[in-house]
């Protein structure tokens, strides 16, 4: 018997012997599900109910679904059912009803074990109920499996165009989070790689400047010694302690949430040069500032990347910076206060970071995991309601193998078009001045103001870059005539005639390979020039930097080695002065040497 909204459609079971016993009523709501997790409908290949007793009637109620049911006979017995269900004219308005009769002379058809039929209901009517009544021959076992669920709010009923559009927007949203997770995974999760640094909540101090051998972070600097921490704030807050600093030495600890928002700073500009203890707390923490804590800094997410940078004045100064790094301390709040530690947070089955997965439809499951690490921001609830149409919901696992192939391909196409949009945005992260892109693409949630493409392109260009007030990053990819920089074709020079970059802290120009975005191997192991370099000056006090693959005779001290091919350069101005911020000073063009 099929029952829809009080419309009864009779199934004549012929020789079936019924004992009209109502065994059980199972109810499930699948309004937002791609695949059921209900114990009675446990998913593909699972048996919803099975009985070896003759004469049992099973009644199963499912709300608002389009499902496929599979019927098996015991010991290869045939189960006689209609494979085609035709619409009935006697139906409530707004619903499609189906009349299924068995052993009817006109429509009867015997089906083999494992054959399927599909029951389709128009779920625009939210309260539509389907009641399915099945009967048994004596000693015949009927197994009912719900192999796939489709609803109006799931990916299988949206159009391909809509699926692609949503996927493109969602991938652009997720891209910086995926790149951030890459660092998190290799630095603190997968301890079997050379890039592994330390477990969560343990500081790693790098005792040498970055070199071409460091390949995890693109466009790294070679001006400072790095300190890195990946914080897990789920159990309790973490205290970061810093020592007293010489006022002439710049340092910063940049706090970055999983979205790649710069949500806080500890360092020269923000907190000064004095010693201090700073409490980093997660989104669920509430309370007064504990004794001995200088400042509480709250994150939107429970996982935080901390990028510490301590200025190095020159090669001979590295040993001094190492001694400073030894004084950086990272401890849980309970340890800092000398109190009982809370129970540890549940362990997480972290997925392997894989470019093949993160840049595919599988990004959905990565994003669903990331979104369990903090609440959806109030400004993004409508956005995520739209994302849910392709299965994006915090904590949900989407089985992509059961997705409608056309929708799956549409989502894949959306990922690829989203990636291309990010890539196309990278050269346009700021206005062009003398061939330099004056990049301003990094900051807090308020800075981005829902410009997710800017956030993603910033992460692609150089993840973990600072706010403009902390450090400026003019980028050169073209010369003065607009041609891409390529040291296999030309030699170049930068002429600082109107003064060096105006920095309260220091400045540098760093060379990167145009293909890998990494530092390049060169015979003198020089990756940057700047205010701590011994630059030769011209008689008028101006400075010229020579950029080429081979050594420029007579200008070795001012040579920035380039690869024998395409390249780009980043100028870093730490604590830029007002002359830079207001545009009074601009970087000079990169000129060809004829």
Image (cartoon, rainbow, N blue to C red):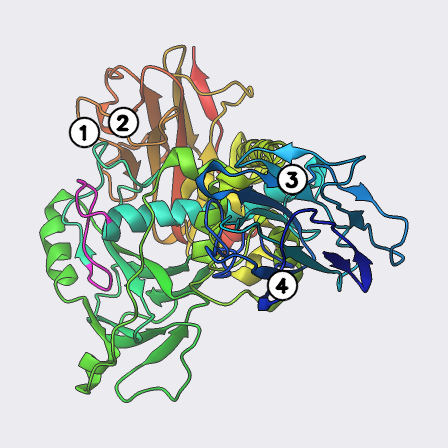
Residue that label 3 marks: 117
Q: Is residue 192 magenta?
A: yes
In the foreground, 83 or 440: 83
Residue that label 1 marks: 525
Q: CA distance from mark 3 to mark 2?
A: 62 Å
Left or right, residue 22 beside residue 101: left
Residue that label 4 marks: 381
Percent from the top left, x then y, of residue 322? 12, 55
Mark 2 against mark 4, which lies toward the viewer?
4
Q: In what quadrant of the picture does the N terminus appear?
A: bottom right
Label 3 element class: strand
Q: CA distance from mark 4 to mark 3?
A: 38 Å
The tag earlier along the polypeptide, 4 or 1, is 4
Do the residues bearing badges 4 and 1 touch, measured as CB atoms within 8 Å?
A: no
In the foreground, 159 or 50: 50
Residue that label 2 marks: 520
User: Which residue is drawn at the image coordinates 56% and 21% (left, top)?
Assistant: 482
User: Which residue is drawn at the image coordinates 61% and 61% (left, top)?
Assistant: 60
Percent from the top left, x then y, of residue 175? 49, 44
Left or right, residue 238 beside residue 477: left
Mark 4 against mark 3, which lies toward the viewer?
3
Label 4 element class: helix
Is residue 469 visible in this depiction of the protein? no
């Amino acid at each position: 018997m099929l029952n829809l909204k009080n419309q009864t459609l009779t199934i004549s079971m012929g020789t079936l012997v019924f004992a009209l016993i109502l065994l059980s009523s199972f109810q499930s709501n699948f309004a937002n599900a791609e695949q059921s997790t209900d114990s009675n409908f446990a998913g593909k290949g699972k048996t919803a109910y099975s009985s070896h007793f003759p004469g049992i009637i099973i009644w199963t109620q499912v709300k608002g679904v389009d499902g496929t049911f599979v019927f098996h006979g015991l010991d290869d017995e045939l189960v006689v059912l209609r494979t085609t269900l035709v619409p009935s004219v006697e139906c409530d308005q707004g619903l499609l009803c189906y009349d299924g009769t068995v052993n009817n002379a006109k429509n009867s058809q015997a089906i083999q074990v494992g054959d399927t039929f599909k029951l389709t209901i128009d779920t625009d009517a939210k309260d539509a109920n389907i009641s399915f009544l099945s009967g048994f021959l004596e000693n015949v076992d009927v197994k009912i499996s719900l192999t796939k669920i489709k609803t109006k709010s799931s990916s299988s009923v949206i159009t391909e165009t809509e699926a692609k559009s949503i996927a493109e927007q969602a991938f652009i949203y997720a891209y910086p989070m995926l790149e951030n997770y890459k660092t998190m995974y290799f630095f603190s999760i997968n301890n079997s790689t050379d890039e592994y640094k330390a477990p969560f909540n343990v500081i790693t101090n790098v005792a040498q400047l970055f070199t071409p051998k460091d390949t995890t972070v693109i466009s790294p600097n070679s001006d400072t010694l790095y300190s890195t921490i990946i914080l897990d704030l789920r159990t309790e807050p973490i205290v970061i302690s810093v020592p007293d600093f010489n006022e002439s030495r710049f340092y910063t600890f940049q706090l970055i949430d999983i979205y790649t928002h710069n949500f806080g700073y500890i360092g020269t500009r923000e907190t000064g040069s004095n010693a201090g203890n700073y409490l980093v707390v997660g989104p669920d923490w509430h309370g007064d500032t504990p004794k001995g804590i200088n400042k509480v800094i709250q994150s939107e997410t429970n996982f935080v990347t901390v990028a510490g940078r301590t200025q190095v004045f020159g090669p001979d100064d590295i040993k001094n910076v190492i001694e400073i790094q030894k004084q950086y301390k990272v401890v849980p709040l309970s340890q800092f206060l000398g109190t009982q530690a809370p129970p540890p947070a549940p362990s997480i089955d972290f997925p392997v970071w894989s470019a093949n997965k993160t840049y595919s439809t599988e990004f959905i499951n990565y994003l669903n995991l990331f979104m369990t690490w903090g609440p959806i921001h109030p400004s993004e609830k409508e956005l995520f309601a739209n994302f849910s149409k392709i299965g994006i919901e915090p904590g949900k696992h989407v089985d992509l193998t059961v997705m409608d192939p056309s929708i799956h391909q549409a989502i894949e196409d959306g990922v690829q078009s989203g990636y291309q949009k990010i890539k196309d945005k990278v050269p346009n992260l700021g206005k062009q001045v003398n061939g330099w892109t004056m990049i301003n693409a990094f900051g807090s949630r308020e800075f981005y103001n829902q410009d997710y493409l800017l956030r993603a392109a910033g992460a692609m260009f150089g993840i973990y870059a600072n706010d403009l007030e902390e450090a400026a990053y003019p980028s050169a990819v073209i010369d003065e005539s607009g041609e891409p920089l390529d040291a296999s074709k030309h030699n170049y020079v930068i002429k600082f005639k109107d003064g060096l970059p105006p920095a309260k802290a220091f400045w540098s120009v760093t060379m990167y390979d145009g293909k890998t975005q990494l530092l390049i191997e060169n015979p003198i192991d020089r990756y940057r020039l700047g205010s701590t370099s011994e630059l030769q000056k011209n008689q008028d006090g101006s400075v010229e930097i020579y950029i080429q693959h081979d050594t420029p005779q007579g200008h070795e001290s001012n040579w920035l080695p380039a690869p024998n091919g395409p390249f780009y350069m980043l100028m870093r101005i730490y604590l830029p002065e007002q002359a830079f911020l207001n545009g009074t000073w601009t970087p000079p063009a990169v000129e060809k040497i004829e």
